[in-house]
Image (cartoon, rainbow, N blue to C red):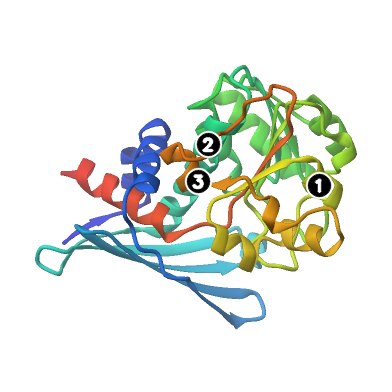
Amino acid sequence: MKWIDSDGVARLAGYEALVEALREGFRAAIETPVRHHHDTGPATTLLLMPAWSKDWTGLKTVTVKTDNAALGLPTIQGSYLLIDNRTGAPVALMDGGELTRRRTAAASALAADYLARSDASVHAIFGAGALALHFARAHRAVRPLKTVHVVNRSRDKAEALVTALKADGFQARVSEAEEAVRAAHIVSCVTGSGEALVKGAWLQPGTHVDLAGAFRPTMRETDAEAVGRAVVYVDTHEGARAEAGDLIQAEREGTFSFDRVAGDLAALCRGSVKGRSDTAAITLFKSCGTALEDLAAAVMVHQRAG
């Protein structure tokens, strides 16, 4: 059995290839039971995510440590075990943190490939943690992004991200929330916020909103007006109904109903629902994460490792 560390995952999981691997994964027959979600401490969540197809079985274990930032450590840590169904033998164990960060960004970029304007060039990113740079890079794999506005509570972290983005060839700056949203063609939120950061009143026609940070019903990154104004898509219906705080709270506040969800990623990838058809529409994609993405990404990494 091979071990693939975080550097290996990063080297093997380029964003463009990963987006295509996820596209094929959502088209395929992959079983994804509801993930196990356990609070094992005041700042610690344990997630167990199995998935299997005809050829492969995978299991990801993740810890979400919300107090790790103060220690200078990643919030998300984990590992991924990949099993060959022909023999039942484990064939690879890989760093789950890097796999998760990359597949999360690639899933949102995959959604943006169907939902964002084809000429989208301005990206606003809320949050400056471990996911932020991945989101900029992954979205650039599907859209001609040039400018990134960074919004974050900590100015130091925001400026560090701006420096990294500039080194990657982006034009980047630290911005205030309203300024960033009004300027952006794509707005990505990768925070652990419990309150709305993006206001619906700020959204301009044609904006695509990408929500990937809030992962509990009590968390949200947008207000109810933002959800109410948008054509809403999700990664999976089951995950959204259970965990998508932005949508759950907007429904409770009367601006949204889950019956209004236009489709999920599988339906978009299979062509059974349409993506953006109106350049002026506001679209919104809510990602809660699914083990399907992990399995598709892990298989690609394993096969590329040889």
Tell me: residue 9, above or below residue 276.
Answer: below
Dot 3 lies on which element?
Answer: helix
Dot 2 lies on which element?
Answer: helix
Contact between marks 3 and 1 (CB within 8 A): the answer is no
Q: Earlier in the sequence, mark 3 or mark 1?
A: 1
Q: Residue furthest bottom?
A: 40
Q: Amino acid at mark 1?
A: Gly
3D distance between C-alphas at marks 3 and 2: 11 Å
3D distance between C-alphas at marks 3 and 1: 20 Å
Q: Picture quarter containing residue 187?
A: top right
Q: Nearer the viewer, mark 2 or mark 1?
A: 1
3D distance between C-alphas at marks 2 and 1: 22 Å
**What residue sits right under mark 1 in the picture?**
228
Decide if residue 181 is in sight here: yes
Q: Nearer the viewer, residue 50 or 262?
A: 262
Contact between marks 3 and 2 (CB within 8 A): the answer is no
**What residue sits right under mark 3 in the picture?**
265
